[in-house]
């Protein structure tokens, strides 16, 4: 590589929303989940990452988020890169200028680590391809993304992905996610995810800390058993287009996630009063209309409303008329199932 020549790569990777939740890591292993998880890959909520690079006599890193220096993110990325020198040995002889941008508000509670870290890994793999040849293997990209942020391993794949070993899906693994795109009923490929921003404040307890608290949670083992059984039933429902089972598992998983937080030591509550107002209003709407719409929650107060495309007009009108009032600044993001990571 010419010492003065600057090369560039750019990838985008989406966020994802888990249906069966990943909550709890095996303490003796690096980013290995206690139970499998399944997620929708989103479309509009994504991270776009570009890297300009050139030859150098030592590793160099410069990071900007939305055009501004971000020391906290730079430290996290530097730590990850130093731990991945065996995967990317060229890092010892290169200077990186990384620019990252989210298409969604950073403080909106959407899982930005999943999108940002998978986009970063794919950029690094693209640099490796340019320097050494070969092809980009999405399974390897998923595995390396997992080491940066567990849920990032699911973001590289389109539509839906499964992370975690389960007998219900041959080829599944704790080390990387697998695509479910060709194993789900067409109905689920049309799903929308309207994300209602109840709070844009920084969470009082990070997801990393929440995972760690599962190690002492008195309900941890029963939770993992329930999640594994939910995976089996969910995969079957996804194949059949069974909306009733899908809705039951989706909402059960959301509430169980937050119940685990309340049963941790120390305990904590991330839901807000408006989170509950949205959920109760949504349940009444479903009861009155018989529209197959449901909710899920991430590790935060914001509400993801899931529904098939054929009901989008009615559900989105309901959100504007009834639920927007519970969102901070009336803010919500209309998203839908997407096609996974791609080169820009």
Image (cartoon, rainbow, N blue to C red):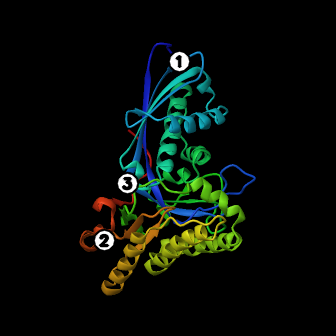
| Camera-side residue of 143 and 258 | 258
Residue under pointer 2 = 323
Q: Which one is in front in this view, the residue at disc 2 or the one at disc 3? A: 2
Identified at 29% across, 67% down, the residue is: 324
* Front position in the image: 100 or 258: 258
- Mark 2 nearby-residue class (10 Å; few <14, some 14–19, many ≥20): many
Judge from the rendering whether residue 91 lies leftward or rightward of residue 272; answer left or right. right
User: How many callouts does the rendering have?
Assistant: 3
Spatial CA distance of label 2 from label 3 is: 22 Å
Seen as rendered, the residue at the extreme bottom is: 288
- The disc, 2 or 3, on the residue closer to the chain's N-terminal end is 3
Residue 105, above or below 35: above
Residue 226's quadrant in the figure?
bottom right
- Few, some or many residues within 10 Å of mark 3 (<14, 14–19, 20+): many
Residue at numbered disc 3: 43
Any mark on residue 159, and which?
none
Image position of 103 with respect to 40: above or below: above
As drawn, is 86 to the left or to the right of 342?
right
* Label 1: how many Cα within 10 Å (few below 14, some 14–19, many 20+): many
The quadrant where residue 260 appears: bottom right
CA gap between label 2 and label 1 equals: 53 Å
Q: Is residue 97 left or right of residue 174?
A: left
């Amino acid at each position: 590589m010419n010492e003065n020549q600057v090369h560039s790569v750019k990838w985008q990777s989406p966020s994802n929303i888990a249906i069966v939740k990943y909550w709890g890591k095996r303490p003796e292993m690096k980013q290995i989940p206690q139970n499998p998880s399944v997620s929708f890959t989103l479309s509009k909520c994504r991270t776009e990452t570009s890297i300009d690079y050139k030859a150098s006599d030592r590793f160099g890193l410069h990071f900007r988020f939305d055009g501004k220096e971000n020391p906290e993110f730079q430290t996290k990325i530097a730590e990850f890169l130093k731990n991945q020198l065996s995967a990317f040995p060229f890092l010892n002889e290169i200077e990186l200028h990384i620019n990252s941008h989210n298409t969604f508000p950073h403080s909106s509670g959407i899982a930005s680590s999943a999108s940002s870290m998978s986009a970063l890994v794919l950029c690094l793999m693209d640099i490796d391809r340019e320097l050494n040849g070969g092809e980009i293997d999405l399974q390897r990209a998923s595995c390396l993304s997992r080491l940066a942020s567990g849920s990032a391993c699911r973001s590289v794949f389109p539509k839906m992905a499964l992370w975690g070993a389960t007998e219900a899906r041959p080829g599944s693994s704790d080390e990387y996610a697998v695509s479910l795109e060709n194993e789900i009923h067409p109905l689920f490929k049309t799903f929308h995810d309207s994300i209602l921003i109840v709070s844009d404040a920084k969470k009082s307890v990070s997801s990393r800390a929440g995972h760690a608290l599962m190690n002492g949670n008195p309900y941890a083992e029963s939770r993992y058993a329930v999640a594994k059984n939910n995976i089996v039933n969910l995969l079957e429902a996804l194949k059949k287009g069974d909306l009733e089972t899908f809705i039951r598992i989706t909402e059960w998983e959301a509430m169980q996630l937050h119940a685990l937080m309340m049963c941790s030591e120390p305990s904590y509550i991330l839901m807000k009063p408006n989170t509950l107002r949205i959920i109760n209003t949504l349940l009444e709407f479903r009861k009155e209309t018989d529209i197959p719409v449901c909710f899920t929650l991430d590790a935060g107060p914001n509400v993801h409303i899931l529904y098939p495309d054929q009901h989008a007009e009615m559900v989105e009108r309901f959100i504007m008329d009834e639920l927007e009032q519970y969102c901070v600044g009336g803010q919500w993001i209309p998203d839908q199932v997407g096609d996974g990571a791609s080169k820009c």
